Amino acid sequence: MDFVTPEYYKIFLPIVVILVLFVGRQKRDLQILVMLAMSYIFFWLASGWHVILLLTSTIVDWTAGKKIHSSSDRKHRKRWLIGSLTINLGLLAIFKYLDFLIETWNLASLRFDGAPELDTFGLLLPVGISFYTFQTMSYTIDIYREKHTPYDKFTDFACYAAFFPQLVAGPIVRSQHFLEQIKDPVSSSPYKFRLGLTLIIYGLAKKLIIADNVAIHVNEIFTEGSNLENIALIWWGSLCFGIQIYCDFSAYTDIALGSAYLIGIELPENFKTPYAARSPQDFWRRWHISLSTWLRDYLYIPLGGSRGGTRVLVISLMGTMLLGGLWHGASWNFVLWGFMHGVLLLCHRVITSSSAIKKSFELAPKISIFAGWMITQYFIFMTWLVFRVEDTTMMLRSLKTFVGIDAYWDYSEFFESLPDVKLMTMGLVLIFVIAHGVSGKLGGFKIWLSKQHSLVWGAICGMIISATFLLRPAETVEFIYFRF
Amino acid sequence: MNITDEDSINFSEVIMSVFIAAFLGMLLSHNFTFSLTDSNLRDSSLMIQSRPLITVEAINTIASDESISIVGTGSSMTFKGLDGKCVAQHMTHESIVYNIAQLSSYPWNDMIHIPRLVNAQPEIVLIEVGPNLLIDLYSENAIENAKFRYKIDTSQQDSSDIGGWIDLIHPELEDFVATNDFHRMELRQEYVTQSIEENLRRIIFNESNARQDWAYGWTPHPESEDWIDYLQTPTFPADRYGFEGMDNSERIDYNETKMDNSASYNPKINSYGYSVIEYEISALVENDISVILIGLPHHPSSIDFVPQGKWDSVNQTMSNFAQIEGVTVFNQIWEPGWIDDHFYDRNHLDDEGRIEFCNRLAPVIDEVLSGRD
């Protein structure tokens, strides 16, 4: 089950809303139990027996949190922290990275005589493991740092770790944020309920109309046998993938936030019009915010951050971005993607510190801002090629074409290479670009809509529902971040 | 109209707004789904042929026709073999003979139109029976074709079309048979994006995938003056005479491999096709509609290669159903007189073959009609 499965809306979500808001009304503990049980059912339907891993992670961090908090012995506390991190990262390493390491070893072993070739385990990646592992780890680390105290009840903590809207693909929620929401019996207000519905409708439209339609173009372009020397084709492919991944992932977040709002729980925002970013730093303040802030708080700052001189800055920034890239998946593509973003961030720091650049911003602020936006987005969309194109030869070819090396521009060949439905998809891309630009300037459409009169809300949402139904392609594409 | 204060929204307003959104969403979706796809499906811009779309409207036309109606159903063999106008001209009874057979059609495709056909009350329905139809739903191609036909056909139907056939739908294909309005809309929605694309191409580039009116595969609009003519004598493929242009040794090689081994030439008495034809016959005769089982001829050189006894079940089927009152058998499979010039390929008639078939069929229909008088 996921957020595009009809059963989620027909059966699962209504049951949760009824049980939490009506059956469990004003009975906090019952509400927590219901949310916990439904979250485990959701996870079991999405990932089967891997539910055991979630339970293990939950028990380990619950125990570690209690032990760390109850002990004043620094060594004892550290031992529990290391134990918790080892188990969490160990599970992540085994289920997400072990086969990748074996494959890398086997590839490397071809260069050495007599090096043994190892069999992979063929392990299936548990859905959402990267998300809930980071979430529970942050809980234990925060207790170790004495920033927070542990949860009083195991069921509260288990509910935090497994809360179904954000379990599979985030946002990564901090423990105190969640605890604040469940201190008292949860209840929704008419406004929250409507905001929840708005977010769900909006998310489904983004996913099914835009992400899934442009995905058809992306898949057609980055397939074996495609002519990747045509600049128009590669630029279009990277633009489409950038739009696909944003609409796919932000749609998941919208639906997650909407589902939680229906039962009165507020989850943090994960995106703020990232393609309006004017610098790489700005991009990371707008893209997958819950991950970037997690990486900042638990990796970048502990590694030294920007407070320890140039060397420390380079090490902590590159280390954070490389691990952030690897977090996305067991592939060198993601490591390279993270590396490229690290380089972009470092370059940005160097460039913005130059007096000439500072002066240009003073002399022609609008032009400088526009140039900053153009350059940033050019490189952001270039990095999407590394993220999307798995085959190394194809990826290198695409990158060369993207920057115009050994490449040509042929519009008619580009047009012929696209799938049958091309004009409509181009129209959707244009609509997205305009809407994204307007949203970057004004923002708050979903909140605005949620506050409108019933007729206005009903008419606009009715039209969005209808457009979603009409314009979705025949095949629904799985959420990209399910793989992570 | 704007509500700026969050607290001023109450739950009854939320319920009302949800109701408005759901109602408007359904209304717009339903109207746009059918209005966007109908004309483009009809003019073949979304499919190679638009003929699969005609059946429901053809039966509606038959229902409104006050003369004696004879309806031919079946596969491409009937489609290419039955010239309705020719048959009508050779008959003594004044009547209209319709050919609503479809390319690649099987009995399980045709059966879903039986309730509508019963309501249309034609005098006679011709049901094709042949070695290619008394089979099970076995191949990927047949399954894909059945899905396609079910989607196209059931998306045009309404609740009055649901009949005994629903129990005969293959379990693997149930999802492609719409039995309610929402499902009908869902099945048709698959063509919306292609339709929008086609319309954009017409507007921006002045280009279209639609077929010209002379082309094989083209179908006229039900409101056009060509419609009734087309339902009797559809646009047939251009004549090519003989056996797909093969020389003698190629024919022998073809017959040796295909006629003996082909899975579609293994008719069985207990097949899915047989059960479906049984349903069709009983539903029609119970409603006082006569049935003529037609066996279309095969190329004489192919018939010689059918192993002894391999098509016995076809004969057995014909004789089983002939016992039912109201059923007549017109089996040309083994009849002499069919020659090379009658055929388009191994099992489809061409211009001369259609005339020969028409000459032989007309008196049989006359006889059945006389029997009804």
Image: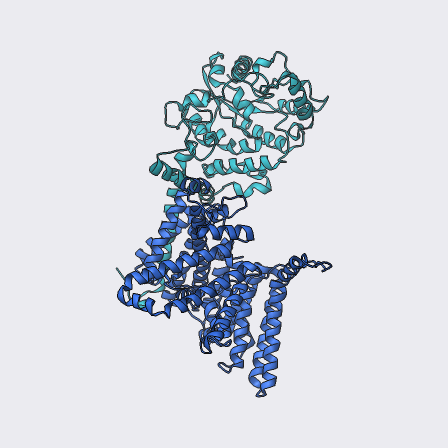
Rendering colour mode:
by chain
- Chain shaded cyan: B
Against A299, residue B256 (above or below) is: above
Against B43, residue A458 (above or below) is: below
| Quadrant in which the C terminus of chain A is drawn | bottom right
| Quadrant in which the N terminus of chain A is drawn | bottom right
Q: Colour of chain A?
A: blue
**Residue A86, quarter of the rendered image:** bottom right
Residue A105, horizontal then vertical, whole percent = 66, 61
Foreground residue among A395 and A248: A395
Residue A43, horizontal then vertical, whole percent = 56, 62
Q: Is residue A464 visible?
A: yes
Residue B373, horizontal then vertical, whole percent = 50, 16
Q: Is residue A391 visible?
A: no
Image label count: 0
Residue B330, horizontal then vertical, whole percent = 59, 18
Against B161, residue A374 (above or below) is: below
Q: Which residue corresponds to the image point at 66% horizontal and 27% vertical from the top-left?
A: B265
| Image-based side of A316 in relation to A52, left or right | left
Q: Residue furthest bottom?
A: A72
Q: Which residue corresponds to the image point at 47% horizontal and 56% vertical from the top-left?
A: A384
| Image-based side of B117 in relation to A272, left or right | right
**Residue A433, quarter of the rendered image:** bottom left
| Image-based side of A323 in relation to A440, left or right | right
Q: Which residue corresponds to the image point at 46% horizontal and 41% vertical from the top-left?
A: A417
Against A346, residue A216 (above or below) is: above
